[in-house]
Image (tube, rainbow, N blue to C red):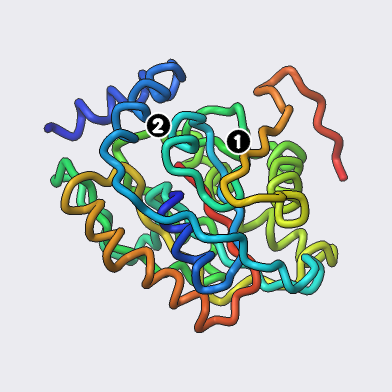
Amino acid sequence: MGLVARAIEEVGIPTVTLSVVRTMTESLPAPRNVLVRFRLGQVFGEPGHVAQQRTILRAALAAFGSAAEAGAVIELPYRWKKEVYEES
Amino acid sequence: MARWWNRLQSVVYTRLHWINELYARAAGREVGEIPLPPLATVRSPLPEARLAVVTTAGVHLRTQEPFDMADGEGDATLRVLPTDAAPADLTITHDYYDHRAADRDINCVYPVERLRELVSRGELGSLAPRHVGMMGHLYGTQWERLNREGARRIAALFRDDAVDVALAVPG
């Protein structure tokens, strides 16, 4: 994933790369990394949980504005189920 | 390796997260020198930006050829996902993570409906006409294939579509 993001960034297109495996991100960081402490195969959360999915998506997109240096990792604070996701 | 064995393992390591971290540590040692480019400038604010997605979750159209699960090194080929494809038109071929949740709701790994909502709310400018589906879990010759050709092809495709920002999503 980091490999693909780097190639996209090289042609001048900013990327944000999500991950659920910290070691994978650290071994080949993408230009902007957003780490989510969720399961493999559910980086945006649970099936049908629109508010949760939207929350993670918005937080990931915010990294386009907030990532300051290449390779930086932004870890989202959200926990799997112990979280209240507001509809908005 | 038999597919049922790979699928069984995927269910186990999707539940036991520390296995993924160990696995990634071993895999990471095999990654060669790949330069980390400087950050490209974000030229368009999100409400004006055109966004494309690349997913390594093995997403493809039901009408497209599934990814090759017979090769233990994976399948580095790409699938172009039209932006207006309905979730019912999409499926996942990937034996190396437990995708039963994403089978029920593709937005778990390919958030196309959530993105469309952000566009309709004015939080995002538009979606690119084409996104890209591929699989993670690439090793050996398949990893080299992605490194030599595939990654650049994705970049060229997004550039041709005048993409402003790209979101890369894992399985």
Q: Residue at x 40, y 62 (%)?
A: B61
Q: Residue at x 45, y 50 (%)?
A: A2
Q: Nearer the viewer, residue A6 or B52?
A: A6
Q: Residue at x 53, y 45 (%)?
A: B109
Tell me the quadrant of the picture where the N terminus of chain B can be found. top left
Q: Is residue B44 above or below residue B8?
A: below
Task: Provide the secondary structure element on which disc 2 rests.
Answer: loop
Q: Is residue A83 above or below residue B161?
A: above
Q: Is residue B78 left or right of residue B52?
A: left
Chain of the residue under the numbered disc 2 shown in the image: B
Measured in 3D between alpha carbons, the distance from the residue under mark 1 to the one under mark 2, in whole angstroms, is 19 Å
Residue B8 in picture, x, y percent from top left = 28, 23
Task: Tell me where residue B151 sits by quadrant.
Answer: bottom left
Q: Nearer the viewer, residue B63 or B7?
A: B7
Q: Residues within 10 Å of mark 1 (few under 14, many from 20)?
A: some
- Amino acid at the residue labelled 1: Leu
Q: Which mark is residue A48?
A: none
Residue wearing tag 2: B98
Tell me the quadrant of the picture where the C terminus of chain B can be found. top left
Task: Tell me where residue B84 sits by quadrant.
Answer: bottom right
Chain of the residue under the numbered disc 1 shown in the image: A
Residue wearing tag 1: A35
Which circle, 1 or 2, is nearer the viewer? 1
